[in-house]
Image (tube, rainbow, N blue to C red):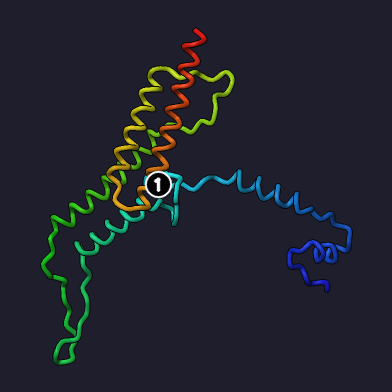
Amino acid sequence: MTKLNHGRAAFKAIDAGGGERIRTIAEELAASRRASSTAQPKRCRSCGAQAQVMDGACRPCLADEQVIKAANRKLQPKRSRKVNAQGRLAYSDGSEKIDRGALQRQINEARARIAARKKRVSSAPTRQTRARPGTRVAGAADLKKAERAVEDARKDLLMARSDWEKDVLRGKYTKAQQELSLLQRQANARRSLG
């Protein structure tokens, strides 16, 4: 039993000869929470969003990147080898009819969508749960910025194409509305205090 160490407390105690202090379950959970809270949140490589990041990019950016890759593959086909009727290799240069203008428009639209998401993420207001003592109280400029964020989120929600994109944008819209209402309450409290 000297080599049986499966990460269990009993095996650790046996392998250590009983002298090693073994962490309790509560200590293990606390350590894992600290490790997960100190880890950097995943960000999209294209737009910088933190929501739904898979393989280094968020879902909308992954979809746009796939559109760009597919269009680039069609624009620049590789030479393929095919066997002709005589059994010899015949090289095709991929000279099929390609609508290069449409493919280039697809690429440009996908890149524009990525740039718009990047702009939205970089200009999005930071999340605040409640005002801390000594922090600046919301002013008219902050209220206008929050109102613009709500309006932009509403427009993005209306322009969404797929269901999952609508779900993501609906969440952003509600967050923007909550932040706007928080700022309005702060401004109203400030006015009432004089």
* Up/down of 184 relative to 101, above or below: above
Residue picked out by circle 1: 168
In the foreground, 129 or 43: 129
Residue located farthest toward the left when viewing the structure as drawn: 97
Residue at 35% across / 41% down in the picture? 118
Residue located farthest toward the bottom when viewing the structure as drawn: 86
Label 1's element? helix
Give the image location of residue 146, x and y in percent.
39, 27
Name the quadrant containing residue 70. bottom left
Give the image location of residue 171, x and y in percent.
42, 42
* Up/down of 95 relative to 81, above or below: above
- 3 horizontally vs 56: left or right: right
* Up/down of 187 relative to 148, above or below: above
Residue at 18% across / 52% down in the picture? 105
- 43 horizontally vs 80: left or right: right
- 57 horizontally vs 102: left or right: right
In the foreground, 115 or 2: 115
Q: Tell me the quadrant of the picture where the N terminus can be found.
A: bottom right
Residue located farthest toward the right when viewing the structure as drawn: 18
